[in-house]
Image: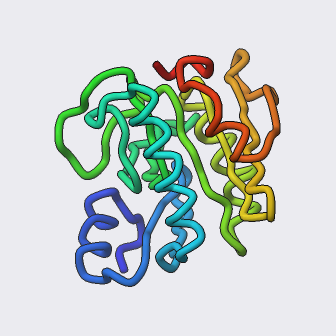
Amino acid sequence: MPPVVTLDDLTAMMAADEHHRYEISPEGVLSIMPPPGYAHAIIATRLMLWLAQGGVPADRVAQAVGLRIPGRHGGVGGRIPDLVVWSKEQADGVWLPVADVLLVIEIVSPGSEGVDTVTKRSEYAAARIPQYWMVDQDQAQTVTMHRLDGDQYTLRATMPLAWVLNTDPAEHDLG
């Protein structure tokens, strides 16, 4: 393991180990996670279908794609959100820029609560991503929607996933 892990190192690690997901904060903190479980995958699929049926083009939505996260002090991290929605199609790559990202969704898994609710929220706000949603794997599959306000997120709404799926993505500035 090199003393300082780069996004290229992370890419090589992921290629060598298909049983884990690797992320790194802009400050260089490495996270190793197991692949998501079935319930997690079903939530992601339901959201992808909702976005597609709501008219968001397939080339503007992706599951588990790497984002290049600029840090406040010049570092660069790599995060792999569960879902990303862009304002326009992106060029192919492993670690995509955040410039055109409209929304990042993280499905909170057991053990990732702190990273998803605090660390990633702060990093995504610093990267100027307009919206950040978290989906809990509780019975209601509660969606907590945040909107960027200045340099931090403010709570916009909290509701069951079933309610979200009965709205139009355009109501959430995603159309």
| Farthest residue, direction left | 92
In the rendered view, does 167 fall on the left or right side of 139?
Answer: left
Q: Residue at x 57, y 58 (%)?
A: 43
- State whether residue 38 is above or below residue 6: below
Quarter holding the N terminus is: bottom left
Q: Residue at x 67, y 61 (%)?
A: 108
Quadrant of the image occupied by residue 80: bottom left
Asked if one can make out residue 128 in the rendered structure from this viewpoint, the answer is no
Residue 159, how many percent across, how many down?
A: 80, 40
- State whether residue 129 is above or below residue 40: above
Asked if one can make out residue 123 in the rendered structure from this viewpoint, the answer is yes
Residue 101, how many percent across, how many down?
A: 44, 29
Quadrant of the image occupied by residue 133: top right
Q: Nearer the viewer, residue 124 or 47?
A: 47
Q: Nearer the viewer, residue 171 or 145?
A: 171
Q: Residue at x 82, y 38 (%)?
A: 158
Quadrant of the image occupied by residue 56: top left
Q: How is the image coloured?
A: rainbow
In the rendered view, does 35 fall on the left or right side of 57?
Answer: right
- State whether residue 155 is above or below residue 7: above
In the rendered view, does 141 fall on the left or right side of 40?
Answer: right
Residue 100, how many percent across, how many down?
A: 38, 24
Q: How many marks?
A: 0
Q: Residue at x 71, y 15 (%)?
A: 150
Residue 155, how many percent across, how many down?
A: 81, 30
